[in-house]
Amino acid sequence: MNKTKITLFTVIILLVALFFVFDLGQYFNLEYLKEKQAAMDAYYEREPVTTTVSYFLLYVIITGLSLPGAAILTLAAGAIFGVLWGTIVVSFASTIGATLAFLFSRYLFREAIQGRFADKLTAINRGMEEEGAFYLFTLRLVPIFPFFIINLVMGLTTIRVLTFFLVSQVGMLAGTIVYVNAGTQIAKIEQLKDILSLELILSFALLGIFPLLAKKTVDYLKKRRLRK
């Protein structure tokens, strides 16, 4: 690892450590959001641009450093900005933050991992080059996979940065809308798991798997036609 990588890695570790040392996670929970909603609404009315920019940057930092708090921030967007504007802000902030985490992972670790396990990763790399967008789209839509893990793991693959960005933007949109919309009714939410029902999770899973299944079916039909 060269000097630049060591410096970047050290800065990231330091920022993550400071987050936990100063217990900043206490500001990213449901109770705190409910308690401060009136104050945040009032500030947004006075300073709409400052509030939006500050919120956007905070969301990018939290997701870029893979820190806990994105779900609460998404609810906050609905509570403060409403469904439409909240969805737009979160959609771009979350995708930019995810892409930063992806790039950090790729820059810091991909070369070492690909070099050490090149023979074992050949098939995976080939699959990502051919169908990476479909796999990523499926992972983005299925809520059981933590988004920060997807960001970091995808950075270790050969998927293109632009593909990662665009697929993440589209793939995370459905979940973003659900959480932002829930944020408009923040007073009625007792815990985060109340937002996603089993039926909704299954719907997301089916929606995410469908494009991949469709592609596999088309590929299969093409192969059968060629054999004939």
Image (spheres, rainbow, N blue to C red):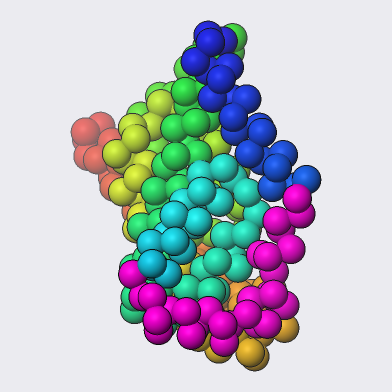
Q: Quadrant of the C terminus?
A: top left
Picture residue at 59% right of the left edge, 25% below the top: 9
Above or below, 129 relative to 148: above
Q: Position of residue 168 (x, y in %)?
A: 39, 51
Above or below, 10 relative to 120: below
For the stretch drawn in magenta, the main secondary structure is helix
Tell me if residue 44 is in the magenta stretch: yes
Q: Position of residue 163 (x, y in %)?
A: 31, 40
Start and end of the magenta stretch? 22-49
- In front: 192, or 2? 2
Picture residue at 47% right of the left edge, 79% below the top: 43
Picture residue at 40% right of the left edge, 84% below the top: 45
Is residue 140 visible in this depiction of the protein? no
Picture residue at 21% right of the left edge, 33% below the top: 226
Compared across the picture, whether 38 is left or right of 20 comes to left
- In front: 54, or 94? 54
Q: Quadrant of the N terminus?
A: top right
Above or below, 9 relative to 50: above
The single residue placed furthest to the front in the displayed view is: 46
* Rendered image quadrant of residue 216: top left
Q: Position of residue 94 (x, y in %)?
A: 44, 55
- In front: 131, or 76? 76
Tell me if residue 213 is in the magenta stretch: no
* Rendered image quadrant of residue 14: top right
